[in-house]
Image (tube, grey):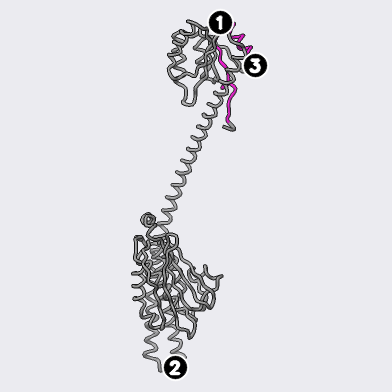
């Protein structure tokens, strides 16, 4: 691993020779070859020095008494999982070598032993140790990698715990904000709408009972008060609808799109007849993933807009059609109304984003915001295709039957 840190004592070569003189000469030879060699008097010192750091161990077979083998075996067994200390054993061939092999069998599976039989060239020992030290460095790289992974895991765990705490804190803050919103909604629903109804009622009564006294101007003022109260009451109702859409728990299920369209058209039959609109509904049969009430609300608002934003002296013509697109079902409501300039296509879905003066067309400027919110809650998509003066094509896309599993995942 790039950047692995290996301390000098971790690549030391520990030497255990039959005599101190042999050990000293071996150290001098290996140091001349560029290695950090350290002589040890006995196996106890080898064990102690290994705990301080070791790259490889060189020992003569003469040093492998039964007690020494057991000490070495315990040392190797206690190494961490990544460590397998290379051992270079210098042995004599023949029966002596067979005895050495018998002793090495005591290591079991914990040893990484290379045997050099005498006689051998000095360069052979150097080459063997160079290979052993390269293997040891790879072990250190694995150690450092595991350490880095452990530190990363600790950091990620700490970050996850910190993030979880933040999520809990923000969830608590959101729940508190929702409680405040519910209280505010209650205030609007009861404390604000009550005086609006009173304003509307008294203004109407004023015209009915004192119309002759008020005169034409007074009656006009009273009617404006009534209309303003009605409009503000509608606005409050629409705001409450948007608020409820944001907070209500929904059940997403498989719906018959044709049945919901037919029911909505029937519910709006009076408005359609009053506007003398021609309504054409294409024959289609699709199932979609959504919520019955929200989908009906979205279609109602789109139909209402198609009736409302019509050209003067032009009979409204509205068409409803549906088609399947890559696992989605698109419901399109087209009209021959006043249309929308392309630069306002996104703006119209914002709350209170009216493109006309309040007196030109009825409404509160919240209808398309309700459509957007309703479709979002159903994990769908909404958009418009239109040119100013050329009518509009509003569309809603919901997941179709082949994505039914996704539908269930959103419940």
Q: 237 or 275: which is nearer to us?
A: 275
- In x, y percent, where is residue 32? 66, 14
Outermost residue, right side: 32
- Whole-angstrom CA distance, mark 3 to mark 2, is 120 Å
The kind of secondary structure element at disc 2 is helix
Checking the image for residue 33, the label placed there is: 3
- In x, y percent, where is residue 410? 38, 56
Residue 12 magenta:
yes
Q: 84 or 285: which is nearer to us?
A: 285
Vertical comparison of 182 with 391: above or below? above
Closer to the eye: label 3 or 1: 3
**In the rendered image, which quarter is residue 329 located in?**
bottom left
Vertical comparison of 231 with 330: above or below? below
Residue 367 magenta:
no
Tell me where the magenta segment starts and ends, as one range.
4-30
Residue at image point 44% right, 53% down = 170
Any part of residue 89 in sight:
yes
Closer to the eye: label 3 or 2: 3
Residue at image point 44% right, 70% down = 332
- In x, y percent, where is residue 4? 57, 30
- In x, y percent, where is residue 209? 36, 90
Vertical comparison of 27 with 279: above or below? above
N-term-proximal mark, 3 vs 2:
3
Checking the image for residue 215, the label placed there is: 2
N-term-proximal mark, 3 vs 1:
1
Closer to the eye: label 2 or 1: 1
Residue at image point 39% right, 87% down = 206
């Amino acid at each position: 691993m790039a950047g692995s840190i290996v301390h000098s004592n971790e690549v030391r070569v520990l030497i255990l020779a039959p005599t101190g003189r042999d050990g000293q000469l071996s150290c001098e030879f290996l140091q001349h070859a560029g290695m950090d060699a350290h002589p040890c008097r006995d196996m106890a010192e080898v064990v102690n020095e290994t705990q301080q750091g070791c790259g490889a161990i060189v020992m003569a077979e003469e040093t492998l008494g039964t007690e020494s083998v057991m000490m070495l075996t315990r040392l190797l067994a206690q190494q961490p999982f990544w460590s397998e200390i290379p051992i270079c054993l210098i042995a004599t061939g023949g029966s002596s070598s067979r005895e050495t092999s018998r002793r090495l069998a005591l290591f079991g599976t914990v040893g990484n032993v290379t045997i050099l039989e005498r006689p051998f060239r000095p360069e052979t020992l150097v080459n063997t140790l160079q290979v052993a030290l390269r293997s040891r460095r790879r072990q250190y790289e694995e150690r450092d990698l595991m350490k880095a992974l452990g530190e990363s895991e600790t950091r990620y765990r700490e970050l996850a715990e910190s993030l979880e705490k933040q999520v809990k804190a923000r969830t608590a803050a959101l729940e508190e904000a929702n409680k405040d919103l519910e209280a505010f909604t209650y205030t609007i629903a009861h404390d604000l709408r009550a005086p609006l109804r009173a304003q509307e009622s008294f203004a109407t009564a004023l015209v009915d009972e004192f119309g002759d006294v008020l005169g034409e101007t007074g009656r006009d003022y009273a009617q404006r008060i009534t209309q303003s109260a009605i409009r503000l009451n509608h606005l409050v109702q629409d705001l409450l609808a948007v608020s409820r859409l944001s907070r209500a728990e929904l059940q997403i299920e498989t719906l018959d799109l044709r049945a919901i369209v037919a029911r909505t058209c029937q519910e709006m039959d009076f408005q359609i007849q009053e506007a003398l609109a021609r309504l054409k509904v294409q024959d289609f049969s699709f199932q979609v993933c959504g919520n019955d009430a929200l989908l009906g609300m979205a279609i109602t608002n789109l139909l209402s807009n198609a009736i409302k934003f019509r050209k003067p002296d032009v009979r409204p013509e509205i068409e409803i059609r549906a088609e399947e697109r890559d696992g989605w079902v698109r419901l399109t409501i087209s009209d021959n109304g006043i249309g929308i300039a392309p630069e306002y296509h996104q703006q119209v879905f914002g709350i209170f984003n009216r493109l006309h003066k309040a007196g030109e067309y009825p409404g509160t400027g919240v209808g398309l915001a309700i459509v957007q919110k309703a479709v979002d809650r159903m994990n769908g998509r909404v958009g418009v295709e239109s040119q100013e003066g050329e009518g509009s094509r509003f569309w809603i896309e919901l997941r179709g039957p082949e994505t039914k599993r996704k539908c269930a995942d959103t419940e």
